């Protein structure tokens, strides 16, 4: 769906049409309406890779139920909840900008992209029950999570999520619940924001176009782009380039030649979900339920049983199950992506990572060779009465984790979200995975502050930014600002149809 005539020599080129590019393009155009912006996307439709509704869990990551954000206990037995507080504050900025988008006409029908779904943490066994109790004490003490409930009572937990309790043995269980959680279709909000952007003067979207080269120019960057339908090769130039191409970001970073790309490697991890469309079962579960991490599983593979609302239809999703792959993109990737990314400057790093993470490699191979019975066994940890005939296996997206030289020396792989920017501040690239989509507005604000400092310093732009994200320069984590946070949060909840 290429929209309008491509912009020649724009101020900004966005590579990839996921939620990061969508938020960056929309925010920049609102802050400075004179900016000329061109977007290139290799697929024929927008937001079809990692941001697509079925290629991620759709969790509005707010630190509410994700135990991986609060993994450690202090020596006194308390749980450090600072990371959960930080994630919540970052997701709040996304909610605020999307609320502004609805109010200002940039995006319609908020139920297309965000819906209220309670977030539940669920554990079993004495040790984990004790951990969750301590976690709840730390969480509920903060004004973000003051409404969080905790229970070990089976009837109460069954009222929250009956599938968790039915058919379960006498092992101790516990759960926390907050009704302020959300289910997000990141593909939908991306398409809405980009649809608005493509209609603005000086902006254009080109789908079915692959950026095949990226070279430094005297001022900015020269790009080579191939039309995938005709094979025609075109060239363009921009003062600033944002590479938000998911798994496709690493090859473009390597082509750019910036110092930050040297020694950088990529580790692709595929994903699969079990999906249930049985209306009787779907109707009985209304929550996103996150559990304990599986042995050797990466952080983003913590299992969860989720209500999903996509294209107006409610379904259940369970997973994710990891899968070994050498592709960097789900729809437009190639099995040669991983071997093609191995360069002399990153070979040693990749070898160190491989040797230091044999358990992870073994885990991925094991996951990829699982039978349906094996996957159902994992599902039974959450839903003991689940029957295989009610579930089907579907492929999800691919995440390419950035591997740096420091990772190779430490023998570890990081699973967060990271933005690399060259010293000239003319190129930024997004790498990593969860919770990137949820906190995308916070990430993009950092890109704008770093790469467009004059724009952020402009009083008019600051006033626009305050209008779009009322808490952008306020530390809402501070209890002193709790009342202001609640006021803004409640307003945005009404606008987005969450209250």
Image (spheres, rainbow, N blue to C red):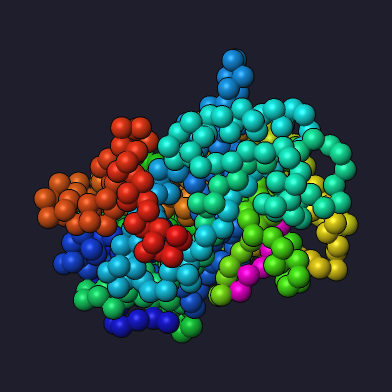
Q: Quadrant of residue 491?
A: bottom left
Q: Does the magenta stretch include residue 316?
A: yes
- Is 264 or 5 nearer to us in this picture? 5
Q: Residue 29 at x, y = what percent?
A: 24, 64
Overall secondary structure of the magenta section? strand
Q: Residue 100 at x, y = what percent?
A: 31, 62
Quadrant (top left/top right/bottom left/bottom right) for the C terminus: bottom left
Drawn side of residue 391 relative to residue 243, left or right: right
Drawn side of residue 226 relative to residue 12, left or right: right
Q: Residue 341 at x, y = what percent?
A: 56, 52
Query: Residue visible at 11% across and 50% down?
Result: 459
**For the view shown, which residue lies furthest in the front direction?**
155
Count numbered badges in the picture.
Answer: 0
Query: Residue visible at 58% across and 33% down?
Result: 136
Give the residues in magenta: 313-320
Q: Can residue 102 be seen in this view?
A: yes
């Amino acid at each position: 769906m290429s929209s309008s005539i491509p912009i020649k020599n724009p101020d900004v080129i966005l590579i990839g049409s996921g939620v990061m590019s969508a938020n960056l393009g929309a925010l920049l155009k609102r802050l400075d309406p004179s900016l000329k912006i061109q977007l290139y996307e290799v697929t024929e439709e927008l937001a079809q890779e990692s941001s697509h509704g079925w290629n991620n869990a759709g969790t509005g990551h707010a630190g509410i139920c994700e135990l991986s954000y609060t993994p450690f206990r202090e020596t006194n037995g308390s749980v450090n909840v600072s990371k959960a507080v930080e994630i919540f504050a970052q997701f709040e900025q996304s909610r605020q900008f999307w609320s502004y988008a609805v109010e200002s006409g940039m995006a319609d029908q908020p139920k297309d992209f965000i819906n209220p779904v309670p977030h539940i943490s669920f554990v079993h066994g004495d040790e984990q029950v004790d951990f969750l109790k301590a976690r709840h004490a730390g969480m509920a003490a903060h004004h973000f999570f003051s409404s969080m409930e905790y229970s070990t009572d089976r009837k109460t937990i069954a009222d929250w999520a009956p599938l968790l309790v039915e058919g379960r043995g006498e092992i101790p269980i516990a759960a926390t619940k907050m009704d302020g959680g959300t289910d997000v279709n990141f593909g939908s909000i991306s398409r809405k924001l980009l649809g608005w952007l493509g209609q603005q003067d000086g902006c254009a979207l080109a789908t079915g176009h692959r950026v095949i080269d990226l070279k430094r120019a005297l001022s900015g960057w020269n790009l080579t782009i191939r039309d995938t339908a005709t094979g025609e090769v075109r060239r363009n130039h921009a003062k600033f380039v944002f590479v938000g191409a998911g798994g496709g970001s690493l090859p473009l970073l390597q082509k750019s030649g910036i110092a930050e790309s040297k020694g950088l490697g990529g580790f692709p991890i595929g994903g699969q979900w079990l999906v249930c469309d049985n209306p009787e079962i779907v109707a009985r579960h209304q929550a996103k339920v996150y559990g304990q991490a599986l042995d050797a599983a990466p952080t983003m593979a913590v299992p969860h049983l989720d209500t999903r609302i996509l294209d107006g239809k409610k379904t259940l999703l369970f997973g994710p199950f990891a899968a070994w792959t050498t592709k960097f993109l789900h729809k437009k990737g190639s099995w040669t992506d991983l071997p093609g990314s191995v360069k002399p400057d990153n070979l040693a790093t990749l070898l160190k990572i491989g040797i230091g993470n044999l358990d992870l490699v073994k885990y991925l191979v094991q996951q990829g060779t699982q039978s349906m019975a094996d996957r159902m066994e994992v599902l039974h940890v959450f839903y003991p009465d689940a029957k295989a005939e009610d579930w089907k296996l579907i492929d999800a997206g691919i995440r390419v984790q950035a591997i740096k030289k420091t990772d190779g020396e430490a023998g570890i792989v990081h699973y967060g979200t990271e933005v690399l920017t060259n010293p000239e501040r003319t190129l930024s690239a997004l790498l990593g995975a969860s919770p990137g989509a949820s906190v995308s507005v916070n990430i993009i604000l950092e890109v704008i502050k770093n790469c467009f400092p004059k724009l952020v310093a402009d009083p008019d732009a600051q006033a626009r930014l305050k209008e779009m994200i009322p808490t952008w320069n306020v530390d809402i984590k501070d209890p002193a600002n709790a009342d202001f946070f609640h006021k803004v949060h409640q307003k945005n909840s009404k606008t987005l149809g969450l209250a």
